[in-house]
Amino acid sequence: MNQIHLKQHQNMLVLGAGQLGMAVLRKLAPRARATNIAVTALISPNTLDHPSERDAEVLAELRLLGVQIIGFDLASDEALLAGLFEKYDTVLNCSGFVAGPGTQLKLTRAVLKAGVRRYFPWQFGVDYDIVGQGSGQPVFDEQYAVRQLLRGQQNTEWVIISTGMFTSFLFEPAFDVVNLKQKTIHGLGDWQTKVTVTTPEDIGRLTTEILLAEPRIVNEVVYVAGDTISYGRLAEVIERVTGQIFEKEIWTLDKLRTDLAKTPDDVMARYRAAFALGDGMWWEKSGTFNARNGYETTDVEQYLKAELGL
């Protein structure tokens, strides 16, 4: 790693230490420590002051990793956030959507106001360029606006990592695509519709490789994938791995849009309607950063076998 690269990363701030933030920090911290890069994790003040048993475990792990910890509320106003961010060369946003609508745009504006050298926004999801504005998903609209904001300036370098959905989300009962207990599979749109999925562990490893890559990746959307799979193929894999027959049904885009119209505030209904579109929800694994650079990732079959202890 050359001196120019080191200078770009003397101080890194990771926003959030949830599922994805911890996956990133577990891979990033040892690499950073070996090259004298300081890594700080931002968590909510309440987590720091009144940790649950689980929070205490996370904090202990962060300290073992050599990660500095600060408590700071992402609901703070833009000027306060900018004042914090200006102390760091690189900001890696793993905060997710829990902070509420508008937060990702506010964080991005604060990063730009602070003059941060390099920013990895919370874009660990679908291809918001293809989805575009007006998708009916307020979260997607905000993510598209974040991209426009970053592209409209030249002072802060940015890298967007597109990962698809978490692999585990396919099996989330509330999402109701795969319900292993009830033995049901619902294809969204049709059986040929595809989706890209990646595990948080793979995202953490690949994010670290992308962040530290030489030559440095600048102002680019980087695609990664654990698997890209059609709902029909997903059904085949599940029945083969479990050795059981599942009840299978297609939920058409019309049906899902009707469901959403009835319950417009239902987040899962929104997601089902979005992922039934297909466009922007998947990309070929062969063209991804991990495939081009020889990094093995966990596909749906491997994930399911591990979950079932097979």
Image: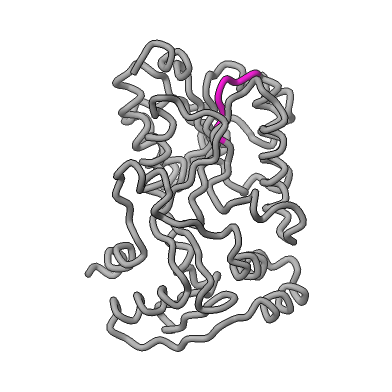
Residue 145 quadrant: top right
Residue displayed at 65% across by 20% down: 155
Residue 263: horizontal and vertical position, in percent? 74, 73
Q: What range is drawn magenta here?
A: 115-120
Nearer to us in this view, 26 or 137: 137
Residue displayed at 48% across by 50% down: 163
The answer to whether 125 is drawn above or below residue 222 in the figure is: below
Left or right: 227 as drawn, with respect to 195: left
Q: What quarter of the picture does the N terminus occupy?
A: top left
Residue 168: horizontal and vertical position, in percent? 43, 62
Q: Is residue 272 visible?
A: yes
Nearer to us in this view, 162 or 73: 162
Colour option used: one colour
Residue 112 quadrant: top right
Residue lying at the far top of the rendered structure: 3
Q: Is residue 59 visible?
A: no
The answer to whether 302 is drawn above or below residue 226 in the figure is: below
Q: Is residue 116 magenta?
A: yes
Nearer to us in this view, 64 or 202: 202
Residue 260: horizontal and vertical position, in percent? 72, 73
Residue displayed at 51% across by 75% down: 192
Residue 54: horizontal and vertical position, in percent? 42, 47
The answer to whether 278 is drawn above or below residue 248 in the figure is: above
Residue 268 quadrant: bottom right
Total numbered circles: 0
The answer to whether 285 is drawn above or below residue 216 in the figure is: below
Residue displayed at 36% across by 41% down: 205
